[in-house]
Image (tube, rainbow, N blue to C red):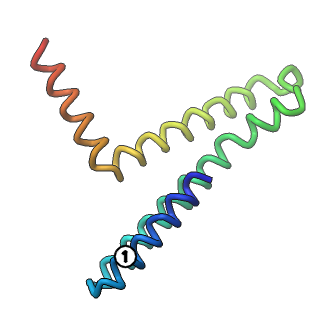
Amino acid sequence: MCNTRTLLFVRNSTRRVHAANTTGQVSHKRDIVLLKITISTFITFVVGWTPFFVIQLFNKTASIPYGLNVFIQILVASSVLQGVITLISTNQPVRTFLIESVTRRCRQV
């Protein structure tokens, strides 16, 4: 729901900017990139968390083979990791904050 709300907000913002007679090609490319990021994040979330939620929903943890349980746990962790990597790679303020935090901590050591 948050991804959809963000996408709609950016789309409305793009329409306002486009109405002000700025270049529409840049706005269109930004919308496409945002749409790709949103879809990939959603698909990763669904693929990563659905098996875990289904197992918890039906309370079948004891009947799942150990190897499959480990695979599902890795799937969840990789889904979270992909979300964090996407956030860092697509959000400039987050990148700036992380770089400043790391350099500040390195200076202290």
Give how far across and how far down residue 101 sits, in percent.
22, 27
Q: Is residue 92 above or below residue 73?
A: below
Q: Is residue 71 left or right of residue 2?
A: right
Q: Is residue 58 left or right of residue 27?
A: right
Q: Is residue 78 left or right of residue 16?
A: right
Q: Is residue 11 above or below residue 96?
A: below
Q: Residue furthest left?
A: 107
Which sits in the foreground, 17 or 68? 17
Which sits in the foreground, 84 or 63? 84
Q: Which image quadrant: the C terminus?
A: top left
Total numbered labels placed on residues in the image: 1
Q: Which residue: 41% across, 46% down?
A: 87
Q: Is residue 96 above or below residue 55?
A: below
Q: Is residue 24 above or below residue 99?
A: below
Q: Is residue 103 left or right of residue 53?
A: left
Q: Secondary structure at mark 1?
A: helix
Q: Which residue: 83% across, 27% down?
A: 64
Give how far across and how far down residue 28 sits, in percent.
39, 79
Q: Residue furthest top?
A: 109
Q: Amino acid at mark 1?
A: Lys
Give how far across and how far down residue 15 sits, in percent.
42, 79
Q: Which residue: 86% across, 20% down?
A: 62
Which sits in the foreground, 109 or 70? 109
| Disc 1 target residue | 29
Give how far across and how far down residue 82 sits, in percent.
48, 43
Residue 30 lies in what quarter of the image?
A: bottom left
Q: Which residue: 88% across, 27% down?
A: 60
Which sits in the foreground, 107 or 70? 107
Mark 1 burial class by Cα count in 10 Å: few <14, some 14-19, many 20+ = few
